Amino acid sequence: MPNVSVNGITIDDTFAEAFGMRATAIIITAPNRKWARQAAITMTGFATSVIGCGCEAAIDVELPPSATPDGRPGCRVMIFAMGTEELQKQLLNRVGQCVLTSPGSACFAGLEGSAALKLGSALRYFGDGWQISKKIGGRHFWRVPVMDGEFLCEATTGLTKEAVGGGNFFVMAESSAKALVAAEAAVAAISQVPGAIVPFPGGIARSGSKIGGKYKGMIASANEAYAPTLRGVVKSALGPDINAVLEIVIDGETNDAVTAAMKAGIKAVLDLGPHKGAVRISAGNYGGKLGKFIYSLKDMLP
Amino acid sequence: MKALTFTLVAEPPERLDLSPLTAERLAGIERHDIEKIQIGMSKHGSKVGDIFRVAGNDPLDIVFEGGSARLDRVAEGMRDGSVRLVGDAGAQAGRAMRGGKLTIEGNAGPHAGSAMRGGRLEITGNAGDHLGAPLAGELAGMNGGVLIVRGKAGAFAADRMRRGLIAVLKGSGDHAGSRMIAGTLVVAGGAGEMPGYLMRRGSILLDRAPKSLSPSFVECGAPESVFAAIIDRHLIAEGILKRPLLGNAPHKYGGDNAVLGMGEVLFPR
């Protein structure tokens, strides 16, 4: 099938290739929205890619007081990693250093999964013997004394093995400003999709990469086919009208969540049109042989 | 199948031990054999058929129509199904139950829910002394499950409680939560003298300041508490209370420092 055009935007006949991952989720609450977001943003900092951060994490959705276990504003945070052991380590380090420390915070399980990951049952040792265990309505909580009262933390949270990491698409535009506008529109749309996160800064990656490189030890390096400054000197994927490419990378709790997020993001870019935003949409893959999940762009159109 | 119904014919001539009448112990027993089970505890030796008119056949849904303070050990050790007593119960109702649901639509005698480990026991009237408490010689009282008393409870409610939730809605007698090991006791409507006497761990949640506490309790401030929000919401969601009990920053007393001192008495500011 040749490339198609929707609303004046070219959609490449290609696909995104994604991988199975392990994921978990927690709900962070705080006295107000500002501090719930602060704790969530802090614990998901430096969590853009498993290549260098150990995990990929971001806020999934913000929760109103009516949707949280303690009736305060909250955020659902998702964390993705390649293995259970690394996921457990990242979860405890991040909640221990960034949520336990954040004023007024509390932390709850955000996922019912096939297995449990330790949360409060490990962090309770901060209480140095003054921690209190409470089982309320079948849920187990730990209360740890801290300097502004108590840190309440659910004992465990769930783990899913159905998670998918690496769903993606490229937003290609005549200028970096237009590419950014289109990518921001896509991120805003994806943020409304439950169970999907975009872990890069503001949800957007500008340094999409290929596997390996000419230097020893590089796991990933410049994707020169999509670098506009190299358009003339390498076998480029870019036509003369493209001067900026931004990538949206999506991790989802399930295959369906990634599909929904890609559809929402692509629709937002298409709705924006070629004059304000992108003129072309593509996606990254490895030939389709490495990843378990394939998202063909032509299936993602509204 | 229809609910297995025991209708009380007249006031019993002696105390009765109703512990054989649970789903577990009645499974596979025909009605005429049920009527031959001896439940009288004195020389009368009354049998089920002497005291009750029996109808229905579903042992997972047992109803006692008519109560008496002589009906002891109702649903003792039950694990599954439901038992409903329309009327009063005697001593040790729901003792050592592990699951299922027991409802007493009347008053219960002493040691109701004694050493229960699971399930839900609800008493719409009042309960006697030693609610959920151990019998003499036992190390721990209630060890799990939910026990609700819509009326008053006597003295020593939740004595030596170890796990689970007890809620008393119209006030308790003296020494509620004495010697608690852990768990949660809720008393609305005022507790008597010295709640939490010699408690080690656990939470006693009151709707007002206690009128007295053992002198080995110490004042521990009133910081904002997520636990208070969680338990308030839980009590409302379970239909136990209609309004929040503690608010978001309850006052805390810690104790009893005559023993371990890791328990707490919380009440709204």
Image (cartoon, rainbow, N blue to C red):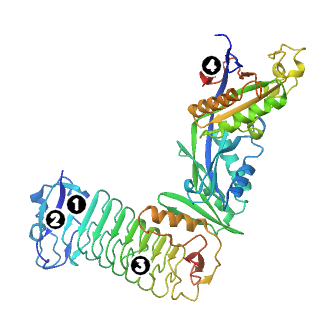
Place residue A188 in its image quadrant. top right
Q: How far is disc 2 from disc 3 in space, using C-alphas?
A: 30 Å
Q: Residues within 10 Å of mark 1 (few under 14, many from 20)?
A: many
Q: How far is disc 3 from disc 1 in space, using C-alphas?
A: 27 Å
Amino acid under disc 4 = Lys
| SS at circle 1 | strand
Q: How far is disc 1 from disc 2 in space, using C-alphas?
A: 8 Å
Q: Residues within 10 Å of mark 4 (few under 14, many from 20)?
A: some
Q: Which residue is mark 4?
A: A298
Amino acid under disc 3 = Ala
Q: Residue at x 9, y 59 (%)?
A: B32
Amino acid under disc 1 = Ile
Q: Quadrant of the C terminus of chain B?
A: bottom right
Determine if marks 3 and 1 fall on one subunit.
yes
Foreground pick, A136 / B13: A136
Determine if marks 2 and 3 fall on one subunit.
yes
Tell us which disc is closer to us: 3 or 4: 4
Rendered location of residue A218, percent (x, y): 83, 28
Q: Is residue A54 visible?
A: yes
| SS at circle 2 | strand
Amino acid under disc 2 = Phe
Q: Which residue is mark 1?
A: B62
Q: Which residue is mark 2?
A: B6
Rendered location of residue A110, percent (x, y): 58, 49
| Residue B69 relative to residue B80: left or right | left
